[in-house]
Amino acid sequence: MEKYKRLPKHIGVIPDGNRRWAVNQGLKKQDGYNHGIGPGLKLYEACLELGVEEMTYYGFTMDNVKRPSLQTKAFQKACVDSVNELKKRDADLLVIGNTDSKVFPKELLPYAMKRTKFGEGRMKVNFLVNYGWNWDLNYALENNDAMETKNLIDHIASKDISRMDMILRWGGRRRLSGFLPIQSIYSDIYVVNEYWPNYTDQHLHDALQWYQETDVTLGG
């Protein structure tokens, strides 16, 4: 495994392109999501070996559930299956999303909004499931302490997720799509033009090589 002088502590993952990949393969759009589970696990294992401390996967958003029901059920199941696999791989797991909605998978309720360590808990892994940036920020308004301290950031739904150093987005799109607006404020963004189911470890290493040359100033 290659070594890097500068390694991002926290990597965000936007696994886009599942539907486009499926269409290119002659499959139904909803079939692409199941093919995205394996890549997510491979990426996790590669980052774990490198020594990355935290990862956040963008599962699905509150806007995504406007898609046809077959697609919605497919990405819900893919999120459940991914979390169940991560439980076997020493993840310190946190699922963040609107649990009040019926579209939030009930299988993930035990891991929602609180971190659960599995095995050795070797890496913090956050999974955004039925997530919405507006919901995340407005969550603080329900907390009286937030209003008294006038520091809303300490009370948002995703407060236990740290700032992301680097965001990797597959599928060629150059947008954040509402991905953790607070934690992404100073993130370096690397776009992979390949669709997510075509993930290889080389994508990660290309991104990390690029990251070596970025000028991280955090606004300073």
Image (cartoon, rainbow, N blue to C red):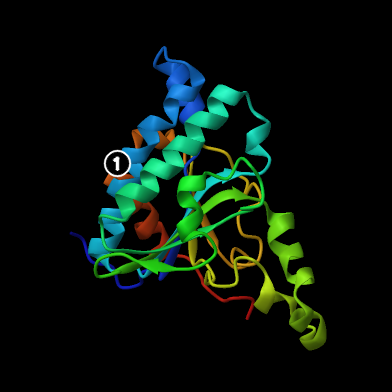
Count of numbered circles on the image:
1
Rendered residue at 39%/50% (across/down)? 83
Camera-nearest residue between 220 and 36? 36
**In which quadrant is the C terminus drawn?**
bottom right
Is residue 47 depicted above or below 176 in this figure?
below
Q: Type of residue at label 1? A: Thr
Secondary structure at badge 1 equals loop
Q: Are there few (<14), some (14-19), or many (20+) residues within 10 Å of tag 1?
A: few
Rendered residue at 50%/26% (across/down)? 19
Residue 185 drawn at (x, y percent): 63, 66
Q: Residue furthest bottom?
A: 149
Q: Is residue 47 left or right of residue 83?
A: left
- Where residue 142 sits, quadrant-wise, is bottom right
Is residue 140 depicted above or below 93 in this figure?
below
The residue carrying mark 1 is 200
Is residue 190 depicted above or below 142 in this figure?
above
Q: Is residue 170 left or right of residue 6?
A: right
Q: Residue furthest top?
A: 26
- Where residue 156 sits, quadrant-wise, is bottom right
Residue 205 drawn at (x, y percent): 31, 53
Is residue 79 depicted above or below 161 in this figure?
above
**Residue 62 seen in render:** yes
- Where residue 78 sits, quadrant-wise, is top left
Camera-nearest residue between 65 and 27? 65
**Residue 171 seen in render:** no
Residue 143 drawn at (x, y percent): 75, 75
Residue 115 drawn at (x, y percent): 45, 68
Rendered residue at 36%/39% (across/down)? 37
Q: Residue furthest left?
A: 1
